[in-house]
Amino acid sequence: MIVNTRTLFKSILWNYPIDCVCDIGSRDGEESIVFRNIIPKAEIIAFEANYINYKQMLTNDLLAEKKIKVYPFAISNSNSVANFNIVDPDDNQAIEIKGSSSLKDNPGFPNSKKIIVETRRLDDFINNLYSNLSNICLWIDVEGAEYEVIQGIQNIKQNILAIHVETAVLPQRVGQQTLNELDELCANYGFKRVGKSFRDSEQWGDVVYFNNTIIDGMKMRLLYFQIKSYISRLIIIYFPFIRNSKYYMGIKKLLKT
């Protein structure tokens, strides 16, 4: 089903006792702040391997005020080091490129600066530092390296309720796995794709997976979440003026319930 995946993912945050969201490939912590506002008592953990973005996040007073933990690791399938491609090493990066750096090479950015970064498996990271967490959600935007991120959740997969991830029908980066391969990996780990933001002809976009254990207990609630997310997508595409109307907050409140 083609939906507003942000709304679908947030349905879990609004309706389940989530104790952690991992913002993987955080860029500037903007999404982490959104998650903190939804679940004020949860752990919000942001990972950003681009040293330019990471340094700026460390000096962001709002991230500190919101008690968002920030780590300079590239989340992947091993605890090691790897080449990381910085698209633009200028400290004054344009916003559209700030989130484009990646473990994967991008032929569209032939002059990327390669640096060495530390990589971490998320399951080892969580088990070592946050072993008390049991209901975790993942927000993944890692520019083509999403398959390796999910490979690295194997030992905590039972504690992860929902995954929002940017991916592609056809590889957009060198060595990127496809959506079908990601579906297969997630299915093997006990997750089902419940929505996506794009048609196959568009080749890339966001998808959402829910853990089968919560799907089994949802019954008609999953369909309810999907319908709300579908309506949210229609509003954004066809009725953008509603965002500026006095009714918008009422609609947002309705979509949360």
Image: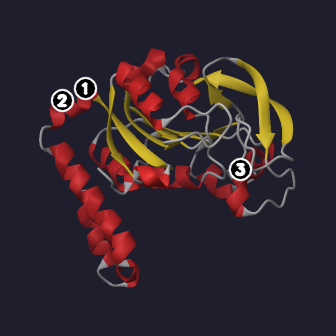
Disc 3 residue type?
Met
Q: Residue 57 carries which label?
A: 3
Classify mark 1: helix, strand or loop.
helix
Classify mark 2: helix, strand or loop.
helix
Horizontal arrangement in the rendering, residue 47 relative to residue 231 (left or right): right
Q: Which of marks 2 and 3 is nearer the N terminus?
A: 3
Residue bearing mark 2: 216
Q: Which residue sits at x=34%, y=78%?
A: 239
- Name the image quarter holding the C terminus: bottom left
Classify mark 3: helix, strand or loop.
helix
Look at the picture and state if 95 lies above or below 239: above
Disc 2 residue type?
Asp
Q: Residue 213 carries which label?
A: 1
Disc 1 residue type?
Thr
Horizontal arrangement in the rendering, residue 3 relative to residue 156 (left or right): left
Q: Where is residue 184 in the image (x, y as percent from the top left)?
A: 40, 25
Q: Where is residue 77 in the image (x, y as percent from the top left)?
A: 60, 20
Q: Position of residue 142 (x, y in %)?
A: 61, 40
